[in-house]
Image (spheres, grey):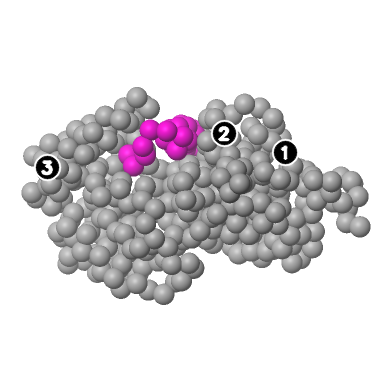
């Protein structure tokens, strides 16, 4: 019988499955509660979705509701993290409170942006209407002839791989990489740890932060989490002077984020980085875990970026990368206790917003572990909702 099953002292209070941004945040906030933490991953730190993102911390694309509440709380926590040690922690993960500019190509799209911004205001989102003749005040090289836009000063950015590594280090968690989880250890309906290819690890609690692999972890408990991968590509240009000052995207991006369509969707998203290259997104499609280059998607991204910033038509693309957003059909993450196995918690399904939502997710999980009311209500994110809908 394993140590986990016979009731001996656990190796850690908490085992977190997944060394991406969500797992790192769960580890960090659990450790702040005085819990000992072990983080497991089959691959490297930020080796999945987190390492293939742009590091967006956005409120500009969120509708009022539970995800917006999580995003607003995360903005507060990201700012607090960035200010730690007189800004040293934020410098390590390239936190930039640079704001975002959402632009419309047509008068109809501009009217839609006006209506959308009005709905966001009661949630505390700051959105400043920018008429067409003022867009160059924010972005001198933006395309002429646009209908206008909205400036969102609360939008920010981090370098996601660095942020993941920084939070893991700050958590003090024990890190075990190259350790795929192949099962859960449980006794009398209570989790006792995890089973990996390198042995068992006992724990009082297990947190499933396995990204698009979270469904298989849930299945070990006999639970249903319909997480699916939603593929996206990002283009990376050659290093440039600071010609794109903010995150800039077209109004179509908001509709793409909330869409459930499995077919290819793309909308122009452009942002500079401290090191010089410009990042160009964003595409979405559900094709399983197929990493085959989609020249249709890559071509669309390049063309849409040049529509926003004509100078990009002459800029070389150095490389592209591909990632898989962990998608849930109702577009809300699953955060909270498992429906069937006590002591198992889930923190997954954030789709493309995981970097931005990570701190509030980690804080929420830590509060639930401590049986304390969280800063943001956990009710809308209950993993059990998928069990209930299947009945």
* The N terminus, quarter of image: bottom right
Rendering coords of residue 376 (x, y %): 53, 30
Front position in the image: 277 or 288: 288
Q: Position of residue 344 (x, y in %)?
A: 70, 45
The reply to whether the C-beta atoms of the residues labelled 2 and 3 are less than 8 Å apart is no
The residue wearing badge 3 is 107
Q: CA distance from mark 3 to mark 1?
A: 54 Å
Dot 1 lies on which element? loop
Q: Nearer the viewer, residue 326 or 223?
A: 223
Q: Secondary structure at mark 2?
A: loop
Q: Residues within 10 Å of mark 2 (few under 14, many from 20)?
A: many
**Rendered location of residue 114, percent (x, y):** 21, 34
Q: Is 68 part of what is drawn in magenta?
A: yes
| Magenta-colored span | 60-81
Q: Residue at x 26, y 69 (%)?
A: 299
- 10 Å crowding of disc 3: few (<14), some (14-19), many (20+): few
Q: Is residue 355 above or below residue 48?
A: above
Horizontally, residue 385 falls left or right of residue 351, namely: right
Q: Does the magenta run of residues contain 313? A: no
Q: Secondary structure at mark 3?
A: helix
Tally of numbered tags: 3
Nearest to N terminus: mark 2 or mark 3: 3
Viewer-nearest residue: 240 or 22: 22
The disc label shown at residue 378, or none: 2
Above or below 330: residue 239: below
Task: State whether residue 23 appears in this view.
Answer: no
Is residue 30 rendered to the left or right of residue 278?
Answer: right
């Amino acid at each position: 019988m394993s140590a986990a099953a016979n009731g001996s002292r656990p190796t850690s209070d908490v085992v977190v499955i997944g060394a991406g941004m969500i797992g790192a945040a769960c580890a960090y906030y659990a450790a702040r509660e005085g819990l000992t933490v072990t983080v497991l991953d089959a691959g490297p730190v930020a080796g999945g979705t987190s390492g293939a993102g742009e590091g967006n911390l956005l409120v500009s694309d969120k509708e009022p509701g539970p995800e917006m509440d999580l995003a607003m709380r995360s903005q507060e926590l990201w700012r607090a993290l960035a200010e730690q040690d007189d800004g040293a922690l934020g410098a390590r993960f390239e936190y930039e409170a640079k704001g975002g500019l959402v632009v419309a190509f047509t008068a109809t799209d501009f009217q839609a942006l006006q209506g959308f911004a009005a709905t966001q205001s009661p949630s505390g989102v700051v959105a400043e209407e920018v008429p067409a003749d003022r867009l160059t005040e924010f972005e001198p090289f933006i395309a002429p002839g646009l209908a206008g836009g909205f400036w969102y000063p609360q939008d920010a950015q981090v370098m996601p791989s660095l942020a993941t590594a920084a939070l893991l280090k700050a958590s003090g968690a024990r890190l075990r990489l190259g350790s795929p989880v192949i099962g859960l250890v449980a006794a009398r309906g209570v989790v006792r740890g995890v089973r990996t290819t390198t042995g068992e690890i006992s724990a009082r609690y297990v947190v499933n932060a396995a990204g698009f692999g979270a469904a298989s972890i849930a299945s070990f408990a006999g639970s249903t989490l319909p997480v699916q991968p939603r593929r996206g590509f990002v283009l990376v240009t050659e290093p440039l002077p600071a010609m794109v000052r903010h995150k800039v995207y077209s109004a179509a991006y908001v509709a793409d984020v909330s869409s459930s369509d499995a077919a290819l969707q793309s909308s122009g998203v452009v942002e500079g980085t401290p090191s010089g290259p410009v990042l160009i997104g964003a595409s979405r499609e559900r094709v399983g875990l197929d990493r085959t280059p989609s020249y249709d998607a890559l071509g669309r991204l390049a063309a849409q970026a040049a529509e926003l910033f004509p100078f990009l038509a002459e800029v070389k693309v150095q490389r592209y990368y591909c990632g898989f957003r962990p998608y849930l059909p109702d577009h809300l993450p699953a955060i909270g206790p498992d429906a069937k196995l006590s002591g198992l918690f889930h923190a997954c399904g954030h789709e493309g917003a995981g970097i931005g939502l990570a701190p509030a997710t980690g804080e929420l999980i830590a509060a639930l572990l401590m049986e304390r009311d969280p800063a943001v209500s956990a009710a809308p994110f209950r993993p059990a909702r998928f069990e209930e809908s299947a009945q």
